[in-house]
Image (spheres, rainbow, N blue to C red):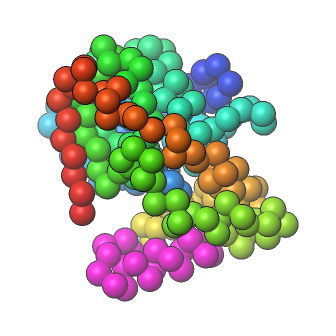
């Protein structure tokens, strides 16, 4: 892991391998460990794989007054591409991380070679009802968020999902305790579906090769 300093944020970055660059973006409320089984596979295929914790998520930090919404995440990812540097990476994103990916692609199309969007957002459809309870969570009860998230993931696994308890704990570990819960509340409250309003029309002229996966 490496710590990469950007304007207004310091990112914890998993950077491994050589070859064609691939940039992996997680969603909410996960971390770079979402890609724990994916990174080794891509490295074995001859790729350089970069998987950051988004700013304000996981082990990555953002300044106290910084917006950690997806539009700002896109700007930080563009800066990360320049700082590392990465030459036109394939941009792969999951969940609400696909909002940051689409915004980056629309604003800086020459920075990337293609998009892979997995179970992501479309226009203003962000499934915000799933995080409404976290957005309204009381700061004094922030320490209770981690157990809640684990219960939700266990429930998902019991109904046919594939996330085991040890993996769920590894992916969500940075959000344990009061400080971790507060980070998650802050991140939830900055999610804004209006940031991708009209994004399809903004992307279409660039003709970026895109694969959309929905499961």
Q: In percent of the image, x 24 and y 57: which residue is there?
A: 214
Q: Is residue 163 above or below residue 108?
A: below
Report whether 43 appears left or right of 136: left
Span shown in magenta: 146-164
Q: Residue furthest right?
A: 140
Q: Mainly helix, strand or loop, the magenta region?
A: helix
Tell me if 84 is positioned left or right of 70 in this view. left
Residue 168 located within the stretch drawn in magenta: no
x, y percent for residue 86? 35, 18
Residue at position x 37%, y 85% from top? 158
In this view, the residue in front, 110 or 12, is 110
125 shown above or below 100: below
Quadrant of the image containing the C terminus: bottom left
Report the side of 193 relative to 163 (left or right). right
Indicate the position of residue 18 as horizontal and vertical percent values: 25, 25
Is 115 situated above or below 188?
above
Judging depth in this view, the residue of 27 and 170 nearest the camera is 27
Residue 2 visible? The answer is no
In the rendered image, residue 22, in percent from the top left (x then y), is placed at 29, 31
Q: Is residue 161 magenta?
A: yes
* Residue 89 sits in quarter: top left
What residue is shown at x 59% (from left), y 39% (from top)? 69
Residue 71 in view in this figure? yes
């Amino acid at each position: 892991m490496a710590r990469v300093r950007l304007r207004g944020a310091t990112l914890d970055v998993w950077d491994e391998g050589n070859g064609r660059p691939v940039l992996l973006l997680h969603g909410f409320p996960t971390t770079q460990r979402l890609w724990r089984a994916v990174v080794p596979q891509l490295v074995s295929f001859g790729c350089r794989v970069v998987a950051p914790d988004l700013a304000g998520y996981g082990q990555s930090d953002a300044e106290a007054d910084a917006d950690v919404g997806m539009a700002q995440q896109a700007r930080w990812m563009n800066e990360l591409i320049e700082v590392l540097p990465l030459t036109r990476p394939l941009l792969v994103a999951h969940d609400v991380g696909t909002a940051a990916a689409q915004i980056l692609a629309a604003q800086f199309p020459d920075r990337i070679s293609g998009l892979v969007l997995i179970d992501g957002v479309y226009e203003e459809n962000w499934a915000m009802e799933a995080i409404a309870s976290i957005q309204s969570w009381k700061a004094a009860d922030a320490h209770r968020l981690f157990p809640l998230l684990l219960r939700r993931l266990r429930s998902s696994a019991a109904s046919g999902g594939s996330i085991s308890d040890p993996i769920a704990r590894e992916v969500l570990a940075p959000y344990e305790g009061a400080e971790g819960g507060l980070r998650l509340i802050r991140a939830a409250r900055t999610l804004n579906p209006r940031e991708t309003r009209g994004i399809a029309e903004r992307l279409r002229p660039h003709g970026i090769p895109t694969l959309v996966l929905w499961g």
